[in-house]
């Protein structure tokens, strides 16, 4: 049986799930492949709406990126609103911006509605790692406030950031008052419990090995089969070759996090008195926050291979010490990695492949809120309301050049080039 990757989150999970594996044949309205935010949110929203829904997860609920990530939820997409306007016009760009705001609100609302104990804490601060990024951030805050009419974001000077974070390494920042951070594994587990309470069936340790399309799609595992009316692929970075057309839209990349031993109150208050989540402006982003028990959770460093680095703790710790050298002697209690999926334009790929077959993936580092949201808009699509998915479909997601086989060499070279620029002033 596959268990969770050892991590701070796995060690502090509220529950240990032990859902059945799929054996024999079953018939359902909707079948979902993948038990992360995308799949579990879809199951929850569909079960709430009264549908018969089955979710099939190869490992454990939350085993993938959803149980291992930085837990940061923030308004905005990787692609700026102005670039979106050039591609899809103002109306769709506005809808997409609003979807990012709604996605954050949805996570908070689900936490509240289902009383999910996942350390929900307010505030996300994006900081400038280079001087020119500080100017760009200032402009971006003005744009959000004046053009998008979004006023819950404030520009902070370098001094103001230094006061909040106890370091003078940054050149200003933007503070999202309505951004937040959560214990992601406990969030997805809480959604799973709520989905089951509404009648959803969740299978674990059940790898889907193939599927058939048609009026009644069929999904096959080694020991079972599900026939359904609608099918959702929610496998993200772990999709592999299961769905070739979807696989061409994404590139899986690995990202890593460490958790220090708990900091003293004095240390914790010095580096982050307000307990906000932080992300810097590097191409390979560093992101960090304090956990509920005052560990510094620091994410940074990524690789593009099939394997994680042998010593994840050292791989990541060097980035933390650059900002907080005083933590060099702190013990690293946990170090882990996960695989996420990016798309070519870094916007999510949420689409209908056929009338009754959907895919939602490629959140490119913004999946905590957007994957949860994707599950909700898929549920609406099944009920005949396609506006949410249409907005994303209007922004085309191109295949990676070379498809799944050849996407690596060129893309990896590009990624390494940009990550090298991170090291320049
Ligand atoms: C280290 C790290 C840090 C991150 N930090 C952040 C952050 O701070 N904020 C943010 O917004 N995003 C972050 N992300 C991204 C975010 O975690 C993902 O976008 C999000 O979790 C995607 O959710 P998902 O449900 O689509 O995929 P996943 O959670 O990866 O779930 C996919 C599931 O599909 C299952 N599966 C795959 N193939 C099959 C099959 N054949 N049969 C059955 N099941 C299958 C897998 O076992 C897996 O459980 C981070 C990601 C990583 C790895």
Image (cartoon, rainbow, N blue to C red):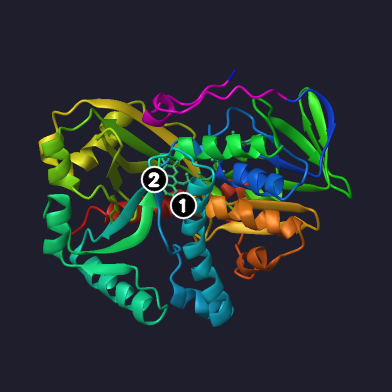
**Which image quadrant for residue 393?**
bottom right
Magenta stretch contains residue 9: yes
Q: Quadrant of the C terminus?
A: bottom left
Q: Indicate the position of residue 171 as horizontal and vertical percent values.
A: 17, 63
Q: Quadrant of the N terminus?
A: top right
Element under disc 2:
loop
- Contact, CB < 8 Å: mark 1 with mark 2? yes
Is residue 373 visible in the rendered structure shown here?
yes
Residue drawn 30% across the image and 48% down it: 286
Magenta stretch contains residue 91: no
Residue drawn 51% across the image and 58% down it: 103
- Mark 1 / mark 2, whichever is N-terminal: 1
Left or right, 48 with respect to 215, comes to left
Numbered circle sitting on residue 120: 2
Numbered circle sitting on residue 40: none
Q: Indicate the position of residue 328 as horizontal and vertical percent values.
A: 14, 33
**Which image quadrant for residue 295?**
top left
Left or right, 394 with respect to 347, comes to right
Q: Indicate the position of residue 174 as horizontal and vertical percent values.
A: 27, 64
Q: Which residues are magenta?
A: 2-21
Q: CA distance from mark 1 to mark 2?
A: 8 Å
- Front-most of 311 and 334? 334
Crowding at dot 2, Cα within 10 Å, few <14 / some 14-19 / many 20+, comes out as many
- Front-most of 360 and 369? 369
Crowding at dot 1, Cα within 10 Å, few <14 / some 14-19 / many 20+, comes out as many
Element under disc 1:
helix
Q: What residue is pinned by disc 1?
A: 108
Residue drawn 72% across the image and 59% down it: 381
């Amino acid at each position: 049986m596959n268990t969770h990757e050892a991590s701070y989150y796995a060690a502090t999970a509220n529950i240990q799930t032990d859902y059945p594996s799929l054996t024999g044949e079953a018939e359902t309205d909707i079948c979902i492949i993948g038990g992360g935010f995308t799949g579990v949110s879809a199951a929850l929203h569909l079960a709430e709406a009264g549908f018969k829904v089955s979710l099939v997860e190869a490992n454990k609920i939350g085993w993938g990126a959803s149980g291992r990530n930085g837990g940061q939820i923030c308004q905005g997409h990787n692609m700026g609103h102005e670039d979106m306007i050039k591609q899809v016009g103002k109306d769709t760009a506005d809808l997409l911006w609003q979807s990012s705001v709604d996605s954050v609100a949805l996570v908070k609302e689900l936490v509240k509605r289902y009383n999910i104990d996942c350390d929900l804490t307010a505030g996300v601060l994006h900081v400038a790692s280079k001087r020119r990024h500080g100017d760009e951030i200032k402009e971006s805050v003005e744009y959000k406030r004046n053009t998008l009419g979004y006023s819950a974001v404030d520009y902070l000077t370098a001094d103001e950031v230094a006061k909040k974070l106890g370091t003078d390494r940054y050149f200003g920042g933007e503070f999202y008052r309505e951004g937040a951070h959560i214990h992601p594994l406990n969030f997805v587990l809480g959604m799973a419990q709520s989905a089951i309470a509404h009648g959803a069936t969740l299978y674990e340790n059940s790898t889907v090995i193939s599927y058939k399309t048609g009026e009644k799609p069929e999904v096959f595992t080694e020991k079972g089969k599900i026939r359904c009316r609608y099918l959702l692929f929610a496998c993200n970075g772990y999709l592999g070759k299961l769905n070739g057309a979807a696989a061409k839209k994404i590139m899986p990349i690995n990202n890593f996090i460490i958790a220090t031993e708990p900091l003293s109150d004095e240390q914790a208050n010095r580096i982050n008195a307000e307990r906000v989540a932080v992300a810097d402006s590097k191409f390979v982003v560093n992101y960090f926050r304090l956990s509920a028990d005052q560990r510094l959770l620091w994410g940074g460093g990524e690789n593009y291979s099939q394997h994680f680095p042998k010593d994840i703790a050292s791989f990541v710790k060097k980035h933390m010490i650059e900002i907080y050298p005083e933590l060099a002697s702190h013990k690293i209690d946990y170090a882990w990695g996960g695989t996420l999926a990016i798309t070519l334009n870094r916007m999510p790929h949420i689409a209908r492949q056929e009338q009754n077959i959907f895919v939602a993936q490629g959140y490119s580092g913004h999946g905590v809120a957007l994957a949860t949201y994707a599950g909700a808009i898929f549920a609406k699509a099944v009920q005949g309301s396609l506006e949410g998915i249409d907005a994303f479909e209007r922004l085309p997601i191109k295949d990676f050049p070379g498809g799944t086989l050849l996407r690596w060499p060129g893309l990896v070279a590009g990624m390494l080039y940009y990550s090298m620029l991170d090291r320049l002033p």
